[in-house]
Amino acid sequence: MLKKTFSLFILLLPLLHFAQDFSALWEGHFSYFNIKDVIPGNNKIYAAAENAIFSYDTDTNDIEKLTTVNGLSGESISTIYYSTTYELLIIGYENGLIEIAFDNDDKILTVVDIIDKPTIPSIDKRINHFNSYNNVIYISTNFGISVFDLERLEFGDTYFIGNSGAQLQVKQTAIKGDYIYAACSNGNGIKKAQISNPNLIDFRNWQTITTGSFLSVEYVENALYAVNTGRRIFEIVNDVPVTRFTYNDAPLHTNSVNNRLTVTTKNDVFVYDAAFNLIVQATVSTDFPTVFTSATSDSEFLYIGTKNFGVLKTAIANPVNYGEIHPDGPLLNTPFSIQAGTNKVWVSFGDYTSRYVPSPVRPYGLSKLDDELWRNIPYDSLFNLRNLNNIAINPFNPQQVFVSSFQDGLLEILDDIPTNRFDQTNSGLESYALPTDPNAIGLRLSGSVFDRDGLLWSMTAIIDKPLKSYNPNTDQWQSYDFSSLIPDPFGNLGFSDLVIDNNSTKWIGSYNYGLIVYNENSGTPLLKNIREKEENMPTTRTWAVALDKRNQLWIGTESGLRVLYNTSDFFTNDNATVEEIIILEDGIAKELLFQQFVTDIKVDGSNNKWIATADSGLFYFSSDGQQTIYHFTTDNSPLPSNTVNDVAIDDVNGIVYIATSKGLVSFRSGSSDPLEDLTNTFAYPNPVRPNFNIVDEKVKIKDLSENVNIKITDIEGNLVAEAQSRTNQRYNGFNLEIDGGTAYWNGKNLANNIVASGVYLVMLSDLDTFETRIIKLMVVR
């Protein structure tokens, strides 16, 4: 293939680079229901979702995904095109980026010429259409037409074809005979030029054949058709537009495949032959109530992109019955809140702004990943609860889940079935009372969590008693008054996060009152907060709170990170303050995450911290924050956005789920929570075979207890490696490292040499209970 021939040439181009494949440790969990474009290519149908691609093999029915994990950017896709000649898929984006995926190759080529062009405004860089001719493609954009050579993989000329060479929006191009035609919007009509003219960069070589605003132009056999914004389709005959039909709805997509013209509106797909005879018309079905977005076809079937069902497949001979085609995935690519359990994660999509504004309302459903399969619960099954956000899983009954609504109350789900809506009519929950409208109803629930006794605690904004507890076993509700701290409930528009420590103290993030702390104290409530600059709080707006394994409270605000190191004397210490973390960077003392908007904090099994930010991606810090283990962004990871809304950890499997503003991804960190004893401890792979890269992939010793000593010896008892919890921690360069409930051995001995083939003994000793265990491990070199 040509991609091999020009591999050296590609490496020399400054504006082209190959994106990295991250599939070894990462997985994408994107939604494929909302389709932007659908095209044929090499016995496959390619469909572009919002920021991911999937292909459907028409012979085998196999589906393959292409996401940020494979190297895509995660930006919003606007159009795609497949070149049969060069066996590659070209992806165009709203921001002007172009990416090229080659068949049978894991690499993604990124082309940044347009996105990096300083003379073109950002809003005008959108890629609208790709049109192939000979060895080049003509790229229709919001500034004109760019030419890209598929053989050399490089840009050629750019045509600014407006008056006096001005930039203008070109929606699509088509070639008929020796002429290229451009459909232009904003009243610029259809322009044409002789394609063999070597000076097409001169706007004077472009002729306007008709005025008006056009959406598309397509060549079918010997005919040329164009669609305008007035819902009309014209045949261009001798450069004169002749009206052929007026659609009820505005055409959204047109294409020409196999000498057939396809026109897609929101309710219908029309397929014509070259003479504009209607071959088939497919209409939105009551079985799949949706909006069509695009369509293509092969000899037997229509493939229709939709807003809600991925691609619908139907027979051209009788387009009545539809079948869904799309990969498994969540409902939307805008996850707001997530909660993970073992081998599962719940996702909500209804949000509120950083100022706790829930409008416009989000009538969205919920999604659940369970053992690698997605179950989606549509909004119409959720008792009309809107703006669903925080998710709480009952630790004593993981099949019982509660989801907060920032509009309507609390949703209960049992065995994946919505069972109850709790609001002001049937529970201890309360609606706010607007002074201007006493009849207005609003139950603005956000943070919720279970305590160790099985009580569900939640926060409701703009009421005097915002803290509520609910006992699922007795159906009893309790309310707790904050009016002594917040005299005007409208003075605090929302509560962000809630955690409970072993003393039943509630640590709460708030909008205007910083960190709020509450304890029932056997009927004599304790209520206190920290929000002032004198207490070292950078702002009153607190978004995340997390207790680590040393009972230190980590606090994320709109303007940075703080830690409350001593939580035990908070109520008795009149001078309680929080602290920033100071690190040395190039010998200079700096505040960790200075002025960063921290959206979430999670603590993993090794007491390290995952910290999400609103615009700087995701950080993974050592337990004290002094070491940055990872800093994931869109530039160095599969994150589709640097806006990270939430993080959840499957502690058993060491999987970190990351909810961004453009989709959900997960990362196998390897860290896991320690267990109570060594009963289930095991090592893998076992045996270690010659094809296993022991140095990089490492042997894992799983399900350790919290405080353990590990010695690895050969069969004769010679010490090979040793580690101890809290001493040989991961990411510090030890040959044997312990990370929470998992240890990692790189196969090296005390002399830093890889061990020889043989049987090795992994000797485990719990330093608290004195429990011991020995595991035999075979290494074959």
Image (cartoon, rainbow, N blue to C red):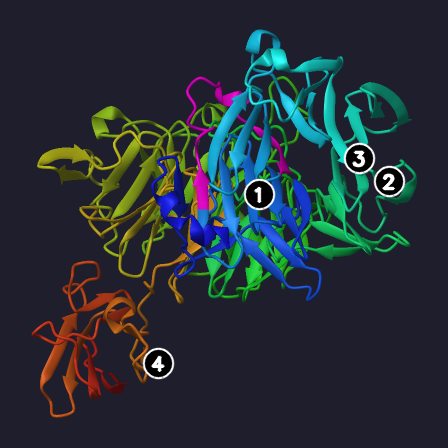
Closer mark to the observer between disc 4 and disc 3: 3
Q: Earlier in the sequence, mark 3 or mark 1?
A: 3
Above or below, 665 relative to 589 = below
Asked whether disc 3 touches disc 2, contact meaning CB atoms under 8 Å apart, the reply is: no
Above or below, 368 relative to 12 = below
- The residue identified by callout 1 is 349
Within 10 angstroms of label 4, few (less than 14), some, or many (20 or more) residues?
few
Q: Earlier in the sequence, mark 3 or mark 2?
A: 3
Closer mark to the observer between disc 3 and disc 2: 2
> Distance from label 4 to label 3 (Cα)?
59 Å
Within 10 angstroms of label 3, few (less than 14), some, or many (20 or more) residues?
many
Tell me the tag on residue 265: 3
Tell me the tag on residue 680: 4
Q: Earlier in the sequence, mark 2 or mark 1?
A: 2
Q: Position of residue 376 (x, y in %)?
A: 65, 54
For badge 2, the amino acid type reads: Tyr
Q: Earlier in the sequence, mark 4 or mark 3?
A: 3
Q: Position of residue 617 (x, y in %)?
A: 37, 40
